[in-house]
Image: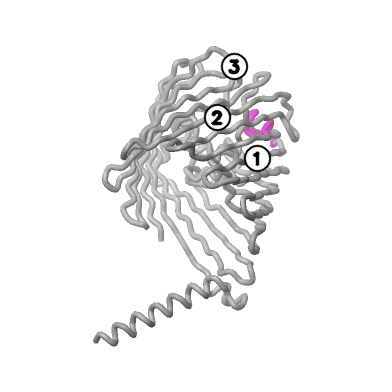
Amino acid sequence: MKTTAVLGAAVLAATAAMAEEKALDGADSPLEMLTEGKFAADLRYRFEHVDMENFDKNADASTLRTRVNFTTANWKGLTLMGEVDNVTSIGDDRYNSTENGQGQYPVVADPEGTDINQAWVKYSGESASGAYGRQRIVHGSQRFVGGVAWRQNEQTYDGVRLQWGADALALDYAYVYNINRIFGPDDGAQPADWHGENHLLRVNFTPWEGHQFTAFGYLLDIDPQSGYPAGRAEGNGSDTWGLEYGGKLGPVGVRAAFARQSDGGQSPLDYSANYYMVEGDIALGPVKALAGYEVLGAGDGVGFKTPLATLHKFQGWADMFLVTPGDGIEDMYLGLSGKLGPVKLAGTWHDFQAEDSSADFGTELDLVATWPINPKLSLQLKYANFSSDDSSRYADTEKAWMTVQFKI
């Protein structure tokens, strides 16, 4: 029995070693590239409740996102991937999805439909890679370029992406000719796609461990589209250049950024505005404390624009400032996070004021509890409460979410 166990362990070890070597070597043929590929899927159910003071009716959205994808094995550095998403509303449409015509309710931007979320071919070498097709592009904190993965229909990008890295330096450039937005696949009150000629560039420099400097340039030339209100399909072209830092100074984690933006591309606007941010965190026993200050400035009545950002991550989860006000915005925030058993807890408080006027916009409290039940199943409860200081501009708003995600 002991000999059998030893032989069995040896066979398992040899099989694992062969599998690891196979993964490193990749597929031996185009056929094996397909047969050794992997299918994956996940289901994400969400219930979202929105109570806005300027609406007589509350929104209740019950939606299910089903995602299926297939990624081939690596053959001579070549990999292909395809991914399809379907968003389905469960029950009555008691919310404005931006394309279901239910304008009497507040917006929950999760329209129904089936869409190709990703479809790309990628070649990877020793220190460089290149991908073409519809793909996920996420830069840094996603303050300028992100996937908006919080919404049921993710934002992805059609174009070419080239990446190179060696030692302390890494380059990332993408040419994007279409942005597959969260409002797809069918146009509603918002365009489902933004076409244009966009250049996304980042250069990361890590001179020593724990400190990274990033220079970036985002040159957006988004084609105007008729039939939509101003700002939704025109005036989104801009040229943005900036610098970021992230690292640790003793026990304190520090992040800072500065950017300068002006109108660009086919934008009919004429403005320039600054962006800056500084943020720090420190562990206090089992709790992490966070403090930050972020400013999106304004120029000539136009606020600093971040149309490709994962906006839900910033300036409060109530999403009151998805478009920067014409007098800019200052966001001072404080947060605490930690764990209670397996459950991750976090809370953040925001104070919002105008950058280019004396206006006070309001305050917001955000709370979240996330329970990773196992590697395949997770549950999240989330809450946002925005209290307005100027009801003529912003309404008191409460939002609550329950999300259940299952990965196959």
Q: Position of residue 21 (x, y in %)?
A: 51, 74
Identity of the residue drawn at 40% across and 40% down:
61
Instruction: Choose top left, top right, bottom left or bottom right for residue 281.
Output: top left
Seen from the viewer's position, the closer of residues 60 and 302 is 302
Please report whichever mark, 2 or 1, sits nearer to the chain's N-terminal start. Answer: 1
The residue segment tinted magenta is 225-237
Quickly name the residue at label 2. Answer: 277
- Amino acid on which disc 3 is placed: Asp
Please report whichever mark, 3 or 2, sits nearer to the chain's N-terminal start. Answer: 2
Q: Position of residue 201 (x, y in %)?
A: 67, 44
Using the image, determine if residue 23 lies above or below residue 271.
below
Identity of the residue drawn at 44% across and 33% down:
317
Q: Which quadrant does the C terminus fall into? A: bottom left
Q: Report, in whole angstroms, how far the alpha carbon at label 3 lies from the one at label 1.
A: 26 Å
Quickly name the residue at label 3. Answer: 356
Answer whether residue 399 is visible to the viewer in this image.
no
Identity of the residue drawn at 28% across and 87% down:
3
